[in-house]
Amino acid sequence: MQKMTMIYWKDGDFWLGKLLERPEIMTQGKTLEELEENIRDAFHLAFMDDIPDQYQLKEIAL
């Protein structure tokens, strides 16, 4: 499980948020719980959608 920092704020009736480490991922929710769920879904759709459940990680130098 990967951890990231969610930045969030209230705008009218909705909570808006984005990931500090991935600011291109932004979404909204009627509650903080819905916002957190939506931002997880957005992250997985953007970066993990085509990766199978059983995968491996390896740190490499670039």
Image (spheres, rainbow, N blue to C red):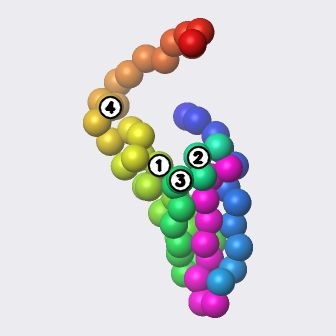
**x and y percent of residue 39 in the render?**
52, 58
Mark nearer the N terminus (4 vs 3)? 3
Q: Residue at x 32, y 42 (%)?
A: 49
The three-letter amino acid code for the residue at tag 2 is Arg
**Residue 62: x and y, percent?**
57, 12
Q: Is residue 27 magenta?
A: no
Q: Give the residue drawn at x 64%, y 43%.
A: 21
Q: CA distance from mark 4 to mark 3?
A: 20 Å
Q: Magenta stretch: give its range.
A: 12-20
Q: Does the CB distance between marks 3 and 1 fall below 8 Å?
A: no
Check whether the beta carbons of the residues at disc 4 and disc 1 lie within 8 A of each other.
Answer: no
Q: Which residue is mark 2?
A: 22
The span from disc 4 to disc 1 (Cα, nearest Å) is 13 Å
Residue that label 3 marks? 24
- Relative placement, left or right, of 60 versus 55 is right
Tag 4: residue type? Ile
**Residue at the image point whose x is 69% and y is 80% from the top:** 10
Is residue 33 at least partly visible in the picture? Answer: no
Query: Considering only order in the chain, which callout, 1 or 3, is on the residue closer to the N terminus?
Result: 3
Give the alpha-carbon distance from disc 3 to disc 2, as whole Å. Answer: 5 Å
Residue type at mark 1 is: Phe
- Which residue is the site of mark 1? 43
Residue 51 circle label: 4
Q: Earlier in the sequence, mark 2 or mark 1?
A: 2
Q: Are marks 4 and 3 in contact (CB under 8 Å)?
A: no
Say which mark, if any, is on residue 13. Answer: none
**Three-letter code for the amino acid on which mark 3 is drawn:** Glu
Q: Position of residue 23 (x, y in %)?
A: 60, 52
Given residues 39 and 1, the one toward you in this image is 39
Q: Are marks 2 and 1 in contact (CB under 8 Å)?
A: yes
